[in-house]
Image (cartoon, grey):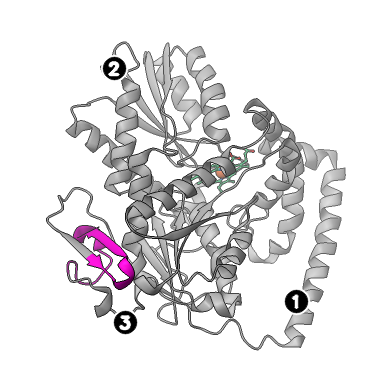
Amino acid sequence: MEATALSSGLRPLPNPNGYRLPRSCSQRKSLPLARFHSKETPFKKPQGSLAITHHRGLSFKTNVFEQAHHPVAGDLSYDDTSRSNVAEDKIGVLLLNLGGPETLNDVQPFLYNLFADPDIIRLPRPFQFLQGAIAKFISVVRAPKSKEGYAAIGGGSPLRKITDEQADAIRLALQAKNVSADVYVGMRYWFPFTEEAVQQIKKDKITRLVVLPLYPQYSISTTGSSVRVLQDLFRKDPYLARVPVAIIESWYQRRGYVNSMADLIQKELQTFSDPKEVMVFFSAHGVPVSYVENSGDPYQKQMEECIDLIMEELKSRGVQNNHILAYQSRVGPVQWLKPYTDEVLVDLGKNGVKSLLAVPVSFVSEHIETLEEIDMEYRELALESGIENWGRVPALGLTPSFITDLADAVIESLPSAEAMVNPPSAGVSEDSESSDAFGYIMKMFFGSVLAFLLLLSPKMFHAFRNHFI
Ligand SMILES: C=CC1=C(C)c2cc3[nH]c(cc4nc(cc5[nH]c(cc1n2)c(C)c5CCC(=O)O)C(CCC(=O)O)=C4C)c(C)c3C=C
Ligand SMILES: [Fe+2]
């Protein structure tokens, strides 16, 4: 697990895991940040545990190996640290997620929010003023196809409901471990937006916050984007700037997660008449290759490590099936991570694979890409390609061992929370505010004109349409 603390001028933001932020991000004012790099050692058996009890009855029982982010594992005592006493705190947990349209009318504005994200469509600096116009254009062009997908799964995304349930389950799991915390949901592209969650956190006077993105692996396009928004909000607000925050950037290595995934796979294999013959097919959401190759996104590496850990766990249980990893859901004209799920399915069918178990691995809730893309499109393609027996592992959702492990991750990261003490961008002059406003108006004007021209040009429309649907 890697926990990061938003904090005071210790180190600049730009190079968290050794990866480079996309230009759009690194060129923004960077937020000072202190980081605690921790690699949980998932295969070491715990050799001891540490109970930390505080006055007011708050008690943490935590495994010393999972305290790797602390300089001296096993020596941890909150009283020894310079950090404030966790027991005194009003603890908040903020779950970050993508969000999804709840009705078909939400689809186009949801897509607009997604494509307006500079971590999703990354434009060279001179063209960044076109972001809004391009987002408008692509969202309008893509909306009909996306709507068909959402219509096929009942008219909207189940993400909000599932994430709310996960929030409740994590709150209860924390309570069962004697940690009282309020759990919030902040979505990146739809309601409840991260901004709303942060307002509530402030209203509730939370004094220590753990940020838990619901993506096991880190990508610039997911966790990176959500955390950037959060940092912007914290930087601007004098109250939030002082709240100690710990960010759990990725957690695919945690035993609880790996074991829970292995449990689900093992169980689903038993539904086949000949479980040993089944190809375990991990299908991860893709990202453009440029994220990995040019910006150092750790997503692909983490994904591969994650699959290795799950397969090692299965092997240790005597499950020796063949497996493969492929990437799904590519959008737009650029190269995405390969191999592509649809191409691999066809190849496997051609090469005589008869039984296949699809395992969605980049996300922990059911969503359009499991319910529509995998269950409908890929299933059909696989059957057409010669695969006879098809199965799919459900998303982790509310699986108790998984939820308990997330609660543990929260507890383990609490001591590493640190406040951002830099004054929020003080002294923004009226001049710079008015020039910002002028720049904004100019961008909106030229952006709208461009979007209008693009939409009117049949040639441009068709070129874009072919790439984005
Ligand atoms: C780890 C998960 C995800 C990564 C990485 C990711 C990158 C990424 N996604 C798009 C474009 C779209 N994503 C869409 C939906 C969507 N994406 C994820 C997860 C990841 N995306 C989820 C869970 C969902 C579903 C939300 C829901 O409503 O259930 C969509 C909209 C759906 C569609 O039209 O297909 C788009 C578009 C890009 C461009 C990208 C990386 C740059
Ligand atoms: Fe996506």
Per the image, is 67 magenta?
yes
Which element carries disc 3, helix, strand or loop?
Answer: loop
Q: Is residue 143 left or right of residue 338?
A: right
- Closer to the observer: label 3 or label 1? 3
Between marks 1 and 2, how big is the CA–CA gap? 62 Å
Q: Residue furthest left?
A: 47
- Ligand 1's quadrant is top right
Give the side of residue 467 with respect to residue 89, left or right.
right
Q: Please, what secondary structure does the residue beneath circle 1 have?
A: helix
The furthest residue to the front: 56
Does residue 68 sit above or below 162 in this rendering? below
Q: Write the residue at 60% across / 47% down.
A: 99
Mark 1 — residue? 436
**Residue 386 covered by magenta stretch:** no
Q: Earlier in the sequence, mark 3 or mark 2?
A: 3
Q: Which mark is residue 82?
A: 3
Circle nearer the N terminus (3, 1): 3
Marks 3/2: CA distance? 54 Å
- Residue 124 as seen in the image, left or right of residue 352: right
Q: Residue at x 51, y 13 (%)?
A: 384
Foreground residue, 340 or 279?
279
Within the image, what quadrant is residue 79 found in?
A: bottom left
Q: Amino acid at mark 1?
A: Asp
